[in-house]
Image (cartoon, rainbow, N blue to C red):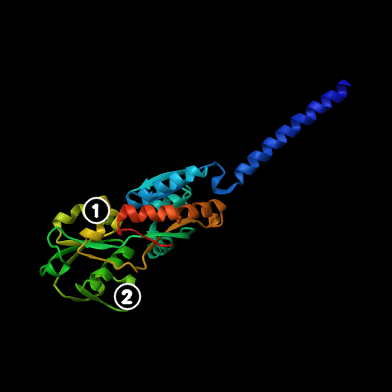
Amino acid sequence: MKKWLLTSVLFATLTVLAACGSEEADSESGGLYADEKLVVGVTAGPHEQILEKVIELGKEEGLNIEPKVFTDYVMPNVALAEKEIDLNIFQTEPYFNAFIEDRNLDLVKSFDTVSFPMGIYSLEVKDIAELKKGAKIGLPSDPTNSGRALLLFEKAGLIELDPEKGINSTVRDIVKNNGDYEFIELDSAQIARQLEELDAAAINTNFAIEAGFVPSKDAVFIEPKDSPYVNHAAVRTEDKDDEIIQKLADLYRSEEIEKFVEETFEGSVIVSW
């Protein structure tokens, strides 16, 4: 009898230990949400505001999303590659492709989010046509945003570019400078702060809003609504099919978020779905 009881206790103990071990294994192999937390990197400004609303919706469905806010365009991808975050939302596809190729990062595009029309801003003039000859005009220094700004300047009638360069245009590809303008390349995050020293500048919408501008009202020239520069989420290649990513995508691209974006940003941020 005692032998049978001892055997039963031992069996029960081993069963419990096996179950615990199984739960640990499940946790370890449970994908991005194994620790019941999804860390999402965003840049400060509109992306951060939209994510805050997504977090609210996630809580209602029992999804725990932790934000990680960055103030530049480099660290969000580096942090993602180094597994400090699970996903990031802040960049356009041309920028993303150039960045991961340059850094040889194993990241992939996940889902489209919103677009931020780049605008030209000025404290000196109210109309782009009022810029004087020789005006100092700022633009982002990183290759992708620089090419985007130059295409915007061309659309505004300030310059003409080598037609074969497209988004890869640099200031050296300006074939006609209609006002003998001086183009000054600056860090994207710093341009709005240095606008007082410039006659005009191309500024990314998130930084413009952060500086207190309302792009749809304050820009003296802005990209059209059919701009191809849609922002998207990025993940590590190994996580691209994780089901938690699809859950986040569904939350982000919901009617509630669309309404929030339209009411909050008044046309300065455009949904892509």
Q: Going by the image, does 271 lie left or right of 207? A: right
SS type, badge 1: helix
In the image, what residue type sits under mark 2? Lys
Residue 49 percent coordinates (x, y): 36, 48
Residue at coordinates 71% horizontally, 33% vertically from top-left?
17
Asked whether residue 153 is in view, the answer is yes
- Looking at this view, is 203 or 253 the one in front? 253
Picture mark count: 2
Quadrant in the rendering for residue 266: bottom left
Pointers 2 and 1 in contact (CB under 8 A)?
no
Q: Going by the image, does 213 lie left or right of 49? A: left
Residue 255 percent coordinates (x, y): 44, 55
Residue at coordinates 50% horizontally, 55% vertically from top-left?
250
Residue 160 percent coordinates (x, y): 23, 76
Label 2 neighbour load within 10 Å: few <14, some 14-19, many 20+: few
The circle drawn on residue 190 is: 1
Farthest residue in the right direction?
1
Quadrant in the rendering for residue 174: bottom left
Asked whether residue 74 is in view, the answer is no
Label 1 neighbour load within 10 Å: few <14, some 14-19, many 20+: few
Instruction: Tell me which label, 2 or 1, sits earlier in the chain.
Output: 2
* Location of the N terminus (image quadrant): top right
SS type, badge 2: loop
In the image, what residue type sits under mark 1? Gln
- Looking at this view, is 30 or 52 the one in front? 52
Q: Going by the image, does 226 lie left or right of 131? A: right
Marks 2 and 1, how far apart at CA: 26 Å
Identify the residue under disc 2.
165
Quadrant in the rendering for residue 163: bottom left
Residue 200 percent coordinates (x, y): 17, 62
